[in-house]
Each structure stands twice: as C-alpha cells, then as structure tokens.
C-alpha cells in the first residue's frame, strides 16, 4: 500500500534533517539498531512544518475525540502548541475550542502554582502527544498526572512506532502494545517501522541495503502485539 503524502513528507524531512539516520546505533536496551530517530533534530522551521502537519493529519484521521492536547515535558511541550495550530489550519471549525496543556518537571510554588500549564484538565478528554514510546515509563507518569487532575486520557499519539519487542518482555509485545493493553486506549503513530520499510519502494529511501538491514532487525526483534 502506497504511503500517504504526509507520511512521505515527514520521512523525507526526517532524513534530510538528520532526525532519522541509518547506520549502527546501540540503544539503551543494548540492541544494535540499523536506524535511529530523534525528534529533537526538527528544530528549524523548514523541518518543523512537515512534522507538525504529519501529526495533525494523523490525529484528524485516527485519534478519538478529545478536548485537550497534552504535551509531557520536555519534547511534548512544543509539539502540543504547534500541532494544535496545525490542527486549526487543517480544520478550524472542528478544533476551534480544542486546548493544549503541558506539565512542569517541578511544581511552581508562586504565581499560578502547580505542575500544569495551559488548559485545566478536570473533566476533559485528553490526548497525549510525544515523540516516541521507549519503555513507556514517561507515558505512565503523564497518565497518572492527568488522572490526578481529573482528566480522562483517551489516547496517545507519537511520531514513530518502532514495532519491536520489549527487551525484558514476552517476546511478542512492544512498549506501545503494552500501553494499549494496560490502559485500553489507542496509541497511534505518524509512521511505523513497516512504513519505513515501505519507503524503500516509494523512493524515499534509495539504498536497498538500508532496507535489508531494517528487515533483518525486524525479523529478530519485531513485535506482533
């Protein structure tokens, strides 16, 4: 199946800007991956536009209804603000009253105080936005924080789903799959590992050796859940 244009634009920008790199990278799990993704490299406007547009299209197409877009500190903070703007450009009538919010790492003891900045979360349907899911620890902390504020987490959206098993897991479940089962919420991604592989036939990735190494990695560590 052909990749949608916004996914192609996202992958092209990620590769061009060095956010998606190919080679040999040792992960925290000690696995050696043939690719590495870092959304922190989307720091120029030229590269930020494709990622925010891709998030917006993914949310519009796949996310459940929500009231607040919540960005966990730190990488989620600019994503929440800029993707909300991109959603407004995509469909202002639908998202006009949608808000964004984010957390502080440390509670503020003066001024407005607290750990939450932006929209109050009480009684709101909240969609968490972040770059990736590694072990899922940060997402669990965000869910706990939102629930403590009286909000309901309806889903999570990230840039990339590596679709690989947890290092100490059951050999079939990914970190994203574990979150889905644990909280019974959708976790959606702009692109998955299979999309990166498909990019080889779309001309986005021109080196067949790169695709082969990714397929070999997937055969060894690929998740089925």
Image (spheres, rainbow, N blue to C red):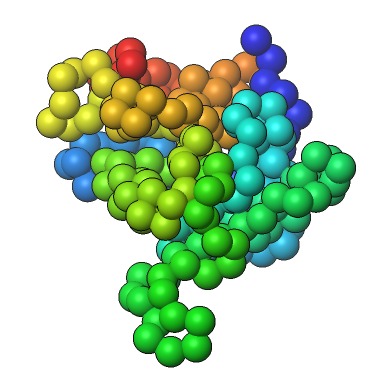
Where is residue 21? Give x, y as percent: 47, 44
Whole-percent x and y of residue 55? 64, 41
Q: In this view, does 3 lie above or below 131?
A: above
> 131 and 46: which one is in front?
131
Q: Residue at x 27, y 41 (%)?
A: 135
Quadrant of the drawing holding the C terminus: top left
Residue at 38 percent of width and 49 percent of height = 147
Q: Looking at the image, can residue 50 be seen?
A: no
Front residue (pair 223, 32): 223
Q: Which residue lies furthest to the left in this view?
A: 168
Relative to 125, residue 196 above or below: above
Is residue 135 found left or right of 99 in the rendered image? left
Quadrant of the rendered image containing residue 81: bottom right
Q: Which image quadrant for residue 5? A: top right
Q: Is residue 5 visible?
A: yes
Q: Residue sitting at 47 percent across and 67 percent down?
A: 116
Q: Which of 113 and 24 is in front in this view?
A: 113
Give coordinates of residue 200: x percent, y percent: 58, 22
Please state the horizontal and vertical placement of residue 43, each as a whole percent of the image: 60, 64
Farthest residue, direction bottom = 110
Determine whether 147 is above or below 173 in the image: below
Above or below for 113 versus 143: below
The quadrant in which the N terminus is found is top right
Q: How many labels does the image show?
A: 0
User: Observer-nearest residue: 199 or 152?
Assistant: 152
Residue in the picture at 16% in, 26% down: 169
In this image, 106 relative to 98: left or right?
A: left
Residue 74 lies left or right of residue 59; in this view the side is left
């Amino acid at each position: 199946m052909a990749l949608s244009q916004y996914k192609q634009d996202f992958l092209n920008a990620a590769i061009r800007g060095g956010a998606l790199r190919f080679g040999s990278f040792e992960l925290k799990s000690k696995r050696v991956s043939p690719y590495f993704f870092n959304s922190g490299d989307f720091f120029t406007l030229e590269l930020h536009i494709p990622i925010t547009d891709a998030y917006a299209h993914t949310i519009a197409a796949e996310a459940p209804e929500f009231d607040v877009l919540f960005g966990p500190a730190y990488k989620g903070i600019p994503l929440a603000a800029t993707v909300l703007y991109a959603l407004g450009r995509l469909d202002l009538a639908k998202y006009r009253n949608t808000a964004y919010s984010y957390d502080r790492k440390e509670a503020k003891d003066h001024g407005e105080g607290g750990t939450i900045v932006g929209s109050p979360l009480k009684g709101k349907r909240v969609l968490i936005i972040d770059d990736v899911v590694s072990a899922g620890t940060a997402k669990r902390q965000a869910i706990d924080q939102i629930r403590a504020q009286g909000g309901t987490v309806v889903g999570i959206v990230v840039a990339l789903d590596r679709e690989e098993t947890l290092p100490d897991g059951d050999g079939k479940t990914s970190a994203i799959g574990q979150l889905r089962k644990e909280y019974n919420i959708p976790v959606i991604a702009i692109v998955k590992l299979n999309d990166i592989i498909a990019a080889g036939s779309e001309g986005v990735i021109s080196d067949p050796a790169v695709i082969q190494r990714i397929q070999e990695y997937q055969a060894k560590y690929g998740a089925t859940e």
